[in-house]
Amino acid sequence: MRSRLRPLIFVAVSLHATVVAAPLATDAENVAELTAEARVVAAELHQQIAGELTREYAISGNLRSIVVCKYTAPELTSAVSRQHGAQVRRVTLRARNPALGTADSWEQGHLLAFERRRAAGEEIATLEAAAVVDEPAARYFRYIKAIEADRLCVNCHGPELSLSAATRKRLADEYPHDRAIGYRAGDMLGAISYKKALPETSP
Ligand code: HEC
């Protein structure tokens, strides 16, 4: 179990200068545990949003589902974050709702790295990273995992000309600066990000 997580920790450490330079064994242990928890929480948020969308989509189709995405996705995001004492959200390099979905610099670095790894042939399901990061306000455990677009997603995130005219109009009305289109099933469509403050440790 521990050995499976080592490459992940190594990648995180090698990519980020802000990461604690040489984690002690106990830190590595903590990162493994925190990563396991973050994976579960990220999957939970993704499943809740996708489940809600699939249900609404089956009942009322695309236009009403846009509303589900607009109001229900942020609500689910807040609820899951509160429940787990962490900030969990969906982020991307090209947001539909820039206020909620724009990646910060740590997330952007990983999204770009994920895109390169994807282009080199890695499976989206394996694209994840974890690290302990010192920020001015606190020390955080951070985790990020890529999301793969499926056929449902491309109804609202597909190439512009593949969207129905009604969907295009609704999206343009609601999101005049929408940059979250152009995806095909099998593309990486953003990521779930998890961020949890760590207790202060004595120097
Ligand atoms: C019915 C239309 C619809 C479908 C289907 C849909 N989305 Fe979205 N998506 C939206 C809308 C609308 C938003 C903006 C939500 C908001 O205002 O916060 C959004 C936002 C997002 C975001 C947050 C970042 C951003 O761009 O604001 C991600 C990530 C995302 N969608 C991924 C997906 C994935 C993955 C799927 C398939 C499982 C999917 N979406 C299916 C409409 C849709």
Image: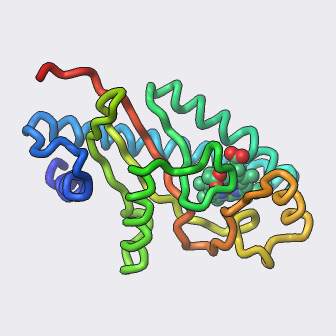
Q: Quadrant of residue 74?
A: top right
Image mark count: 0
Judged left or right of residue 46, residue 167 is: right
From the viewer's perspective, tell me whether residue 11 is left or right of residue 165. left
Q: Position of residue 58 (x, y in %)?
A: 80, 55
The residue closer to the viewer here, 30 or 97, is: 97
The residue at the point 55 percent across, 56 percent down is: 92
Q: Does residue 132 appear anywhere in the picture?
A: yes
Q: Is residue 201 above or below residue 62?
A: above
Residue 111 against residue 18 in the figure, above or below: below
Give the percent coordinates (x, y) of residue 17: 22, 51
Residue 73: image quadrant is: top right
| Image quadrant in which the C terminus is located | top left
Q: Furthest residue to the front? A: 136
With respect to residue 166, does 45 lie above or below?
above
| Residue at (42, 42) in percent of width and height | 40
Image point 55% across, 48% down: which residue?
90
Residue name at image x 45 percent, y 39 percent:
41
Give percent across and percent down for residue 173.
Answer: 87, 55
Q: Is residue 99 left or right of residue 28?
A: right
Which quadrant contains ligand 1? bottom right
Q: Decide if residue 50 is in sight here.
A: no
Query: According to the image, what is the colour scheme of the structure?
Result: rainbow
Q: Taking 31 as reference, is 86 left or right?
A: right
